[in-house]
Image (cartoon, coloured by chain):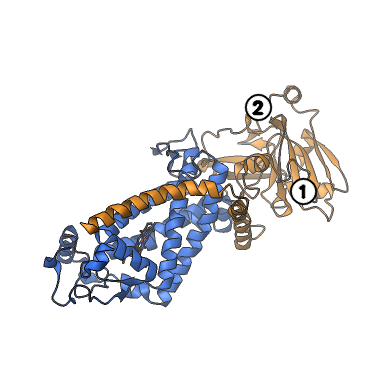
Amino acid sequence: MSSLITRRALVKTAALGTGALLAGCDRVAELPAARKILFSGEKLNMGLQRALSNRHSLAPEYRVDQMSPFFRTNGTSNPGTPEYAAMVADRFASWRLKVGGLVTRPLAISHAQLMAMPARTQITRHDCVEGWSAIGKWHGPMLGSVLKAAGVKDSVRYIVFTCGDLYSGANYYESIDLIDAFHPQTILAWGMNDQLLDVGHGAPVRLRLERQLGYKHAKYVMAIDAVASLTGIGLGKGGYWEDNVDYDWYAGI
Amino acid sequence: MTDATRSPDIPPPGTATPIYRHRLTTRIWHWVSAITIFIMIGSGLTILNAHPHLYWGQFGANADHAWLHTVRAPSWLTIPAGYNLAIARRWHLLFALVLGFGLLFYMVSSLLNRHFQRDFRIRARELTPAHLWYDAKEHAALRFHDPKQPNARNIFQKLAYVLTIFVLLPAMILSGLALSPGMDAAWPWLLDLMGGRASARSVHFIAMVGVVLFIIVHLALVILAGAWPETRSMITGWWRIPGHDKREDAA
Ligand code: HEM
């Protein structure tokens, strides 16, 4: 009999223990010190991934017959502002991509100039943080060529993108470091699946950052700034989702 | 346990000498992993809730054919309880490192101290239908230990542990790595191994179900074999043959 009681007690303890563990995780995540440990995974994973790859390791590229038949949109599917509507109406003729910040030659690149630059075509996989993925064909100049044309200064550590779509009333923004900015597959895509990039996917230009998740691939890019630090950009964590809902800045996983 | 199962080779009640059954490295790995697995499953279910559809192949999104639409994991199973993808990912991706490096540590140490070779080696003799049938009958009668070699693992136990340690957990880790766009660039063979990212996500889910089934059977057998003596052996390392020391059973 006694062993039966022990058994029942153990099952009960195990069930309670599991519940307490799951609930305990939520409590722990609120403690500042524990939160710091929890959030340290980002730096660890980034360090490990950077150590295991080299700065030029390429994301896999696919064949035409491997492309998604339908590439869904996500996030903003139309910025819907009067300014953006006007840009669409004149087919981005008066749109200028402003490249500034800590650069020696600030630029204002027109849609036609951007399309005249030597471009890369890549069929790559887009991985959303939510778990879906889609394969599409992207076309546009390397971000690195644009940055070289502008001449980033030595003090620059990050590249910040300011977008035409609004989140909580302010422009969406994202940032990447120079390793990713000068990666050969990091392009400013103005073409998708052999057509001009459409509104749903970020016209006139979106970033492709093939070794990271979708929310880093800024759409509706209006301005690119070279900065020495992320302090003062939004709340300082480098992006809208990073600042507002604790997403990782390094989204390589 | 009744006296009928007692073999004459075994010392009378109260005098059974404890056996050193689990080394320190095994014990540390076991409890760290047990906690880690619960965190991984809880946070993994939150991540699954973000897109509860599974596909095969290189890609998969809403318009594509899903082979499985999972039911929404209830909040009492998920970490955090309320849906928060960002925090779930923080838990999952930090503890993934504990799981991965922990398994590596356990594998290396168990090869060096010959725990794997000694305790998990499956002999051809044990896989004969006659032996399997004999062991199955012993299981059904709740006799898990060969009285003559009480420290030896029986064949089903070995198969379950070997499957978990060498198949399920590595599949879990490799398919998880294949989900990372950064790792796919670093190690492109991950995608070849899995048959694409959408397939890796399906493999990840199936391996998780396998681990859950293992845990259910594992806990049931630990309880049937003598919950406290077994658990204590995994804490202190020392195990007394259950059923041969009444004082232990009553503890
Ligand atoms: C809190 C729940 C758990 C309890 C109470 C528990 C208990 C035990 C006990 C008592 C043993 C020793 C059995 C023997 O003497 O052979 C054992 C071994 C083992 N358990 Fe668990 N366990 C738990 C969770 C897990 C989980 C989640 C996993 C991994 C998926 C796991 C994997 C293993 C493995 C692989 C062994 C064999 C280790 C070796 O001998 O090297 N256990 N467990």
Q: Which residue corresponds to the image point at 51% horizontal and 60% vertical from the top-left?
A: B98
Q: Compared with residue B181, is residue A75 higher up or lower down, i.e. above or below?
A: above
Chain B shade: blue
Q: Residue at the left extreme? A: B4
| Residue denoted by label 2 | A78
Q: Which residue corresponds to the image point at 67% horizontal and 36% vertical from the top-left?
A: A191
Name the spot of residue A102 as percent of width and height, x first. 84, 48
Q: Compared with residue A91, is residue A103 higher up or lower down, i.e. above or below?
A: below
Ligand 1 rendered quadrant: bottom left
The reply to whether residue A232 is in sight is: yes
Q: Chain of mark 2?
A: A
Determine the CA span between mark 1 and mark 2: 28 Å
Looking at this view, is B237 or B16 the one in front? B16
The reply to whether residue B195 is in sight is: no
Looking at this view, is B219 or A31 the one in front? A31
Secondary structure of the residue carrying tag 2 is loop
Name the spot of residue A78 as percent of width and height, x first. 65, 27
| Residue denoted by label 1 | A145
Looking at this view, is A62 or B100 the one in front? B100
